[in-house]
Image: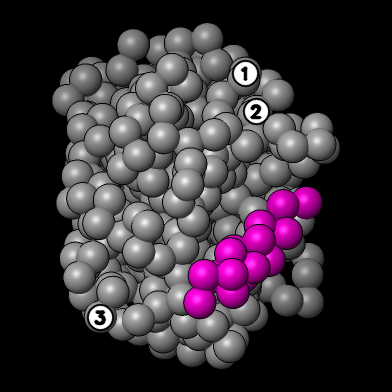
């Protein structure tokens, strides 16, 4: 993928006006929809009116914060990092998963202001300011994580406005349920990535650069907008179709489910994350929202075949309802809570996983799945 190709979607205008760092720390509040209040200081961009909103979730990675912040799957959400010290190795364009962040904000305990790494080109704070993303630092993220774990992910508001203003904004924030967040992150035009021998059409529901890097080793990849009809995909005569990760509620992306249903049994299909949920839906399954989602780089997943355990990178708030899945077999299960992590369609060359085998960040235990996709395509050429 060239430096100017969309990692996902057009860069577009920053959601908040850019502003320089303040001369002195600005006190700020984080208010959750259930009324819980957390103190801290502003960082990154300053939101208009002193209020930023979104659905608050926590991520447990200890490194890879840049990849997390630039993952389009976080559109509409505020990311709270459980690891206390964020930003010590700075930011570099080489580690971005998309051209810009799509998250609504970032919350940390301690934000490093003097990174130490030869690859670093700027601090996290400067990066967030440049892209118009507001942030809070100095927050008691241990207490915050425990609260979300017990009460569930929920809308929030943070900034320099009064507590009452922030409480009203948190109550008015709709979150991600029932909203088509994919439309806010997908590319507006088709583009090409990779130079492998096979031909793959990849649906961009919020695709990550690392996924394209992995697919590009086995295929020449044409990335298409999320709303591309199945007929247009088949006109390209692909050896396989890839369904990418992405943000939000799979039930709100009916047009994608319709297209996937028309592609099944016509061409091999491989889905990741939201692509997994959409494939399952096209096969007749239902999805549900997890209490606080799976967001981190250390989730144990067991393969049903052979029983091997993979440590996986995950980022999703929705999952497939097990008793609704009749058109596929379960291939992987999350050992934390038993959630379905992988399926294979019955009698159809199609499979998917809920987690991220490409990593970015995270372990590489599951990268064999790209080879599985290559073999599936070769077998059906």
Name the residue tied to disc 1: 337
- Which residue is drawn at the image coordinates 26% and 30% (left, top)? 177
Q: Is residue 288 above or below residue 117?
A: above
Q: Residues within 10 Å of mark 2 (few under 14, many from 20)?
A: many
Which secondary structure, mark 3?
A: helix
Per the rendered image, the range of residues in magenta is: 365-381
Name the residue tied to disc 2: 334
Q: Nearer the viewer, mark 3 or mark 1?
A: 3
x, y (%) of residue 131? 39, 65
In whole angstroms, how far apart are the C-alphas of marks 2 and 3?
37 Å
- The magenta stretch spans residue 378: yes
- Which residue is drawn at the image coordinates 59% and 15% (left, top)? 146
Q: Earlier in the sequence, mark 2 or mark 3?
A: 3
Q: Is residue 267 left or right of residue 14?
A: right
Q: Do the numbered discs 3 and 1 sit on residues whose CB atoms are within 8 Å?
A: no
x, y (%) of residue 137? 55, 39
Which secondary structure, mark 1?
A: loop
Name the quadrant containing residue 157: top left
Give the label on residue 235, or none.
3
- Which residue is drawn at the image coordinates 62% and 18% (left, top)? 337
Q: Residues within 10 Å of mark 1 (few under 14, many from 20)?
A: few
């Amino acid at each position: 993928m060239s430096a100017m190709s969309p990692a996902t979607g057009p860069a577009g205008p920053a959601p908040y006006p850019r502003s320089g760092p303040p001369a002195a720390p600005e006190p700020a509040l984080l208010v959750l929809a259930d009324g819980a209040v957390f103190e801290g200081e502003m960082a990154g961009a300053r939101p208009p009116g002193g209020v930023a909103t979104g659905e608050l979730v926590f991520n447990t990675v200890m490194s890879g914060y840049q990849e997390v912040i630039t993952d389009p799957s976080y559109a509409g959400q505020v990311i709270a990092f459980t690891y206390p010290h964020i930003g010590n190795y700075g930011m570099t364009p080489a580690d971005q998963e998309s051209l810009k962040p799509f998250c609504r904000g970032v919350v940390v305990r301690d934000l490093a202001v003097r990174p130490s790494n030869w690859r670093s080109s700027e601090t996290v704070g400067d990066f967030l300011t440049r892209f118009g993303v507001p942030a809070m630092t100095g927050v008691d993220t241990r207490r915050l994580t425990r609260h979300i774990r017990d009460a569930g992910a929920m809308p929030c508001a943070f900034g320099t406005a009064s507590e009452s203003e922030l409480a009203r904004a948190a109550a008015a924030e709709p979150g991600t349920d029932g909203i088509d967040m994919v439309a806010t992150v997908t590319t507006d035009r088709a583009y090409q990535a990779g130079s492998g021998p096979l031909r793959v059409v990849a649906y961009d529901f919020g695709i990550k650069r690392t996924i394209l890097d992995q697919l590009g080793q086995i295929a020449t990849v044409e990335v298409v907008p999320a709303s591309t009809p199945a007929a247009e995909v088949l006109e390209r005569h692909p050896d396989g179709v890839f369904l990418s990760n992405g943000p939000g509620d799979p039930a709100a992306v009916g047009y994608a489910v319709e297209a996937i249903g028309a592609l099944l049994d016509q061409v091999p299909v491989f889905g990741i994350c939201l692509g997994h949920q959409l494939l399952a839906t096209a096969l007749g399954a239902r999805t549900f929202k997890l209490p606080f989602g799976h967001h981190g780089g250390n989730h144990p997943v067991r393969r049903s075949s052979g029983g091997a355990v993979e440590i996986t990178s995950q980022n999703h708030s929705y999952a497939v309802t097990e008793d609704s899945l009749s058109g596929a077999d379960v291939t992987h299960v999350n050992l934390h809570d038993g959630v379905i992590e992988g399926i294979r369609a019955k009698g159809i060359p199609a499979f998917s996983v809920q987690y991220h085998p490409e990593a970015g960040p995270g372990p590489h235990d599951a990268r064999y799945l790209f080879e599985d996709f290559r073999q599936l395509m070769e077998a059906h050429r």
